[in-house]
């Protein structure tokens, strides 16, 4: 009985996490792709440079801590505005771990 409840809770939490990830992917396309490109490379679909840095450069990304990148997203950095009013700290961190890192992984394969 207990384990069935635990399994159900786990299923529910996985479901809501994937819904959140879907929402964050949509947020990236709406608010971040204008500078970082739909694929995170900093280029538009036709290859034009957009002005945001390349977020999926694997050697750079491998040296970054998720917490540091999340802090930049919230506070802003250089020409990038801060997104503190739109995102919680947990959401900013998930943008790094669940949206930006998978984009980088997809690019490499
Ligand atoms: C107006 C253009 C613009 C928008 C919109 C924008 N960025 Fe940026 N972003 C930049 C620029 C430019 C940099 C490089 C800043 C620097 O290091 O001087 C940057 C840097 C970053 C970095 C690296 C930060 C670091 O600490 O080195 C991350 C991560 C990032 N952006 C994520 C995002 C995410 C996620 C969004 C959407 C919520 C977003 N950006 C929206 C322009 C933008």
Image: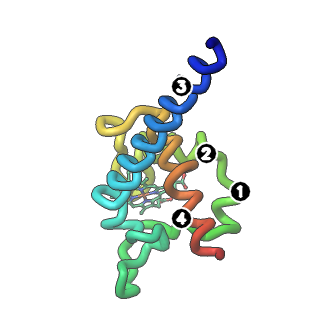
State which mark lies toward you, 3 or 4: 3
Marked residue nearer the N-terminal end (1 or 4): 1
| The N terminus lies in quadrant | top right
Which residue, as the protein is rendered here, is positioned at the far front? 1
Residue tagged 3: 8
Q: Is mark 3 within 8 Å of ligand 1?
A: no
Depth check, front residue: 76 or 38: 38
Residue 62 lies, in percent from the top left, at: 70, 59
Q: Residues within 10 Å of mark 1 (few under 14, many from 20)?
A: few
Label 2 vs 4, first from the N-terminus: 2
Q: How is the image coloured?
A: rainbow
Question: Label 1, label 4: how many angstroms apart (C-alpha)?
Answer: 16 Å
Q: Which mark is residue 63?
A: 1
Q: Residue 46 is drawn in which quadrant?
A: bottom left
Q: Nearer the viewer, mark 3 or mark 2?
A: 3
User: Measured along the vertical axis of the image, is residue 4 above or below residue 88?
Assistant: above
Q: Position of residue 41 (x, y in %)?
A: 49, 73
Label whose residue precedes the other's in the sequence (3 or 2): 3
Q: Are the residues tagged 2 and 1 within 8 Å (C-beta)?
A: no
Name the residue: 70% across, 67% down: 59
- Find disc 2 in the rendering and name its residue: 66
Circle 4 is placed at which residue position? 103
Q: Assess whether mark 4 and mark 3 are in contact (beta carbons under 8 angstroms).
A: no
């Amino acid at each position: 009985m207990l384990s069935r409840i635990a399994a159900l809770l786990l299923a529910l939490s996985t479901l809501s996490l994937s819904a959140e990830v879907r929402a964050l992917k949509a947020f990236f396309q709406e608010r971040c792709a204008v500078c970082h490109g739909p694929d995170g490379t900093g280029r538009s679909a036709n290859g034009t440079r957009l002005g945001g840095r390349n977020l999926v450069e694997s050697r750079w990304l491998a040296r970054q801590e998720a917490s540091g990148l999340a802090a930049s997203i919230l506070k802003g950095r250089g020409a990038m505005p801060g997104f503190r009013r739109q995102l919680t700290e947990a959401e900013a961190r998930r943008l790094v771990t669940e949206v930006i890192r998978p984009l980088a992984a997809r690019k490499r394969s």
